């Protein structure tokens, strides 16, 4: 039995040592790296060979990869690395790893071409200055062969253990049965369609109401497909924490039903939730868990992979037992897990960990995107950027000497952008090159200063640096799917200041590539209609399959009533207050219990709450507050018990509009006093115009469809199980319009 491994993965396992050190960061994105490689290789001679495919074997190992470039005239193999900042400050263990990769590729080339010796070169390209640094060494083939054998020998025991586990896992997966014996209504259809999609290598959109068990209904068929489709990984991607918890619970159920299944599952969490020392920098001179990280990593990794369900707590316990950083241990474990659960950004972000690993290791993937109606807004955010001149002004008051000129030049170019702008908001057709170049110089100067004194600059510098870096990265992507706009305001001393925005309107060119990189991608949610909206904006392939799963609920379980005698339009808000409060009080008196009432804003919510308290003080009220933390959100939901009675007021599209579970008597109804339409403002009108140009449906794509998705999600909080009964009141005359009613779930019987 042969174990296949990429050169880069082999060396990252065997040749990393010393401290975890992020001072020579952030590294360029994958796109910047690829573009940098192309610039380097394009400047070489006519006989230069790029992307040289190489492979070799050592006992049970087959090592393969693509060397960046080979110059036959110089007999020189090149390993190209992109970077930012002063190369002299690169940590020694980074260079050690790069040489290890070059030497492994070097032996594979010597073996293939029968070379007695070979020149190896590390070529470093600074992506900001485009400056190349070349470091060259001459090696004998026998020395390279010995090095290759040494690295393989270090990995061989791990590889044999992995092959043994994989064989046991595959056999157990072939015998795996559905954990609950019987599928719920609709769940079998969903599972069968997911299995067919991955078997044929297609993308799938699955619209399925809450209550059929979507999480298990999508995970289980992919586990069954893992062996026959030769999948390397399953990525379960979520919008929010509750989605991760549902996935972990589904995997626990699978594990409980098949105790002999050695399946490894990993939960990835955000850095600020995993970090043990938020007050320290990520290097050995500051954080004790970064000191000697790679020296202690092998033992921590070996212990962690024996834990089948590697949730946040399990990873933390192993990490602290071996005195390594939990966050970076989890990133290492992603290489060895079968199922990885994490936020969308781990795959779709411009510098996404999971996408980068998948590309580097050529993994065969299946993706699951939970609550995929959120994916449009989330990917837009990942591919957008903004810069506020207020931040720059604060930094310019007393800058380090090395930054004074770059900051002045940047501010000068910034002011020039809007000197002729008359109104507070304006969109522009072109992105100004002079400003971007000034920003790049500033980013480079700040990065150099960070490398010199990583703990000597305060948080404001760090925040501006990362915002500016994101802006430069997004600027490279700028095109018809973007809007560049400037919002100006009056600053201190009545001086004008401006916020610059690069707004992604259509993420499809970027998100579509990520989806296409997987063997199969399944996007599932209770609200994926109309399908063309998501297909257009996310870049789904033309042959993307679709299933609208039969609801397990009946119309008799949910009374849906449109109250078209009330308008919730902004100009009618004042007139709507009393009728809405009377409607809520009347329903509460008729059927006491727990209700949620959703509004378009905190201001509207507060106005209705005040009138309700005045006119109907007998109705208990619980109000969502602005910027609630997790503990406050838990306290709010805890008021909805089997024995309580009251009305919770919440903002549509907020923390309580989706992803919460209040079954049975904990919630028996919802009042939705809004269509969920985005605010009418110059920004949204600009997005509407651009969507109209691209798709011919500017209003629907900007306002109507996203708003109705929020409405249906909020209404979906009411019926959570087969025994639930409840009522939903849709409060606005526009709910009676035919095109609006057509977007509501088919199983609803609207009165």
Image: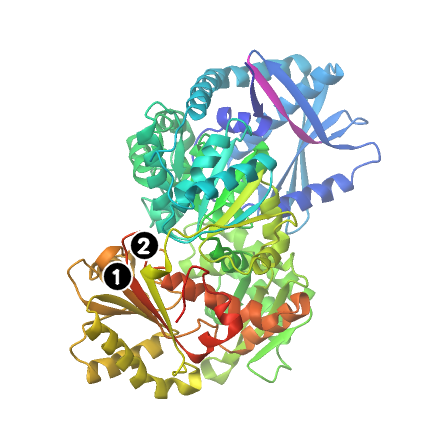
Q: Nearer the viewer, residue 334 or 168?
A: 168
Q: Quadrant of residue 537?
A: bottom right
Of labels 1 and 2, earlier in sequence is: 1
Q: Which residue is painted at 45% across and 59% down in the image?
A: 463
Q: Which residue is tagged 2? A: 720
Type of secondary structure dominating the magenta stretch: strand
Q: Nearer the viewer, residue 179 or 14?
A: 179
- Queried whether the magenta region covers residue 66, the answer comes back as yes
| x and y percentages locating residue 151 in the rendered image | 54, 19
Assess disc 2: are there few (<14), some (14-19) or many (≥20) residues with their C-alpha within 10 Å of its C-alpha: some
> What's drawn in magenta, residue-wise?
60-68
| x and y percentages locating residue 658 in the rendered image | 37, 59
Q: Are marks 1 and 2 in contact (CB under 8 Å)?
A: yes
| x and y percentages locating residue 411 in the rendered image | 57, 70
Q: Is residue 50 left or right of residue 414?
A: right
Q: Quadrant of residue 79?
A: top right
Q: Which residue is painted at 63% across and 51% down in the image?
A: 128
Q: Which residue is tagged 1? A: 667
Q: Nearer the viewer, residue 564 or 333?
A: 564
Residue 676 visible from this viewpoint? yes
């Amino acid at each position: 039995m042969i174990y296949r491994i990429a050169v880069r993965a082999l060396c990252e396992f065997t040749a990393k040592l010393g401290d975890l050190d992020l001072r020579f960061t952030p590294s360029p994105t994958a796109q910047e790296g690829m573009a940098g490689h192309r610039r380097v290789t394009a400047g070489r001679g006519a006989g230069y060979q790029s992307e040289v495919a190489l492979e070799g074997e050592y006992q049970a190992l087959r090592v393969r990869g693509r060397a960046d470039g080979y110059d036959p005239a110089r007999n020189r193999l090149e390993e190209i690395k992109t970077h930012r900042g002063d190369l002299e400050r690169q940590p020694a263990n980074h260079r050690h790893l790069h040489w290890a990769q070059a030497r492994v590729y070097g032996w594979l080339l010597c073996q293939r071409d029968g070379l007695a010796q070979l020149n190896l070169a590390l070529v470093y390209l600074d992506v900001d200055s485009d400056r190349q640094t070349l470091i060259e060494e001459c090696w004998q083939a026998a020395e390279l062969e010995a090095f290759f054998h040494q690295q393989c020998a270090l990995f061989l025991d791990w590889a044999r253990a992995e092959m043994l586990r994989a064989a046991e896992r595959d056999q157990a997966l072939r015998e795996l049965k559905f954990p609950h014996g019987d599928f719920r209504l609709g769940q079998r259809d969903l599972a069968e369609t997911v299995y067919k999609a991955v078997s044929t290598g297609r993308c799938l959109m699955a619209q399925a109401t809450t209550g059929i068990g979507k999480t298990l209904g999508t995970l289980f068929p992919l586990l069954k497909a893992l062996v026959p489709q030769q999948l390397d990984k399953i990525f379960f991607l979520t919008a929010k924490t509750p989605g991760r918890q549902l996935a972990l619970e589904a995997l626990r159920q699978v594990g409980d039903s098949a105790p002999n299944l050695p399946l490894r599952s990993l939960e990835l969490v955000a850095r600020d939730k995993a970090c043990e020392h938020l007050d320290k920098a990520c290097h050995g001179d500051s954080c004790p868990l970064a000191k000697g990280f790679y020296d202690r990593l092998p033992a921590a990794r070996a212990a962690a992979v024996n834990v089948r369900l590697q949730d946040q707590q399990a990873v933390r316990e192993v990490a602290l037992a071996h005195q390594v950083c939990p966050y970076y241990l989890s990133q290492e474990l992603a290489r060895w897990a079968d199922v990885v659960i994490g936020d969308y950004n781990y795959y779709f972000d411009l510098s996404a960990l999971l996408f980068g690993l998948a590309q580097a290791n050529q993994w065969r993937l299946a993706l699951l995107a939970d609550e995929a109606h959120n994916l449009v807004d989330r990917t837009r955010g990942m591919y957008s950027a903004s810069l506020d001149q207020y931040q720059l002004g604060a930094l310019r008051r007393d800058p380090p000497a090395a930054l004074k000129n770059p900051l002045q030049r940047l501010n000068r170019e910034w002011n020039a952008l809007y000197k002729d702008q008359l109104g507070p908001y304006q969109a522009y057709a072109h992105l100004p090159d002079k400003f971007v170049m000034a920003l790049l110089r500033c980013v480079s100067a700040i990065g150099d200063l960070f490398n010199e004194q990583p703990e000597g600059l305060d948080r404001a510098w760090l925040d501006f640096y990362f915002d500016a870096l994101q802006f430069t990265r997004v600027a490279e992507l700028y095109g018809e799917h973007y809007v560049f706009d400037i919002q100006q305001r009056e600053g201190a001393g009545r001086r004008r200041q401006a916020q610059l925005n690069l707004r992604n309107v259509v993420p499809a060119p970027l998100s579509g590539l990520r989806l296409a990189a997987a063997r199969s991608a399944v996007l599932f949610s209770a609200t994926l209609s109309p399908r063309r909206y998501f297909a257009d904006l996310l870049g789904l392939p033309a042959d993307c399959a679709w299933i609208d799963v039969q609801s397990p609920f009946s119309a008799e379980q949910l009374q849906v009533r449109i109250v078209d005698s009330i308008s919730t339009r902004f100009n009618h808000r004042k007139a709507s207050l009393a009728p809405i409060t009377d409607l809520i009080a009347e329903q509460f008196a008729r059927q006491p219990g727990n209700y949620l009432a959703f509004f378009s804003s905190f201001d509207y919510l507060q106005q209705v709450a005040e009138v309700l308290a005045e006119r109907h003080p007998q109705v208990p009220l619980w109000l969502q507050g602005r910027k609630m933390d997790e503990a406050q959100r838990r306290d709010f939901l805890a008021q909805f018990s089997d024995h309580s009675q009251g009305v919770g007021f919440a903002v549509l599209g907020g923390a309580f509009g989706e992803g919460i579970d209040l079954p049975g008597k904990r919630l028996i109804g919802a009042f939705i006093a809004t269509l969920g339409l985005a605010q009418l403002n110059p920004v949204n009108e600009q997005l509407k115009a651009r969507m109209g140009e691209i798709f011919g449906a500017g209003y629907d794509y900007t306002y109507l469809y996203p708003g109705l998705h929020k409405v249906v999600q909020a209404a979906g909080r009411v019926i959570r199980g087969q025994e639930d009964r409840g009522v939903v009141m849709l409060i606005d005359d526009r709910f009676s319009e035919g095109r609006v009613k057509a977007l509501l779930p088919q199983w609803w019987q609207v009165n």
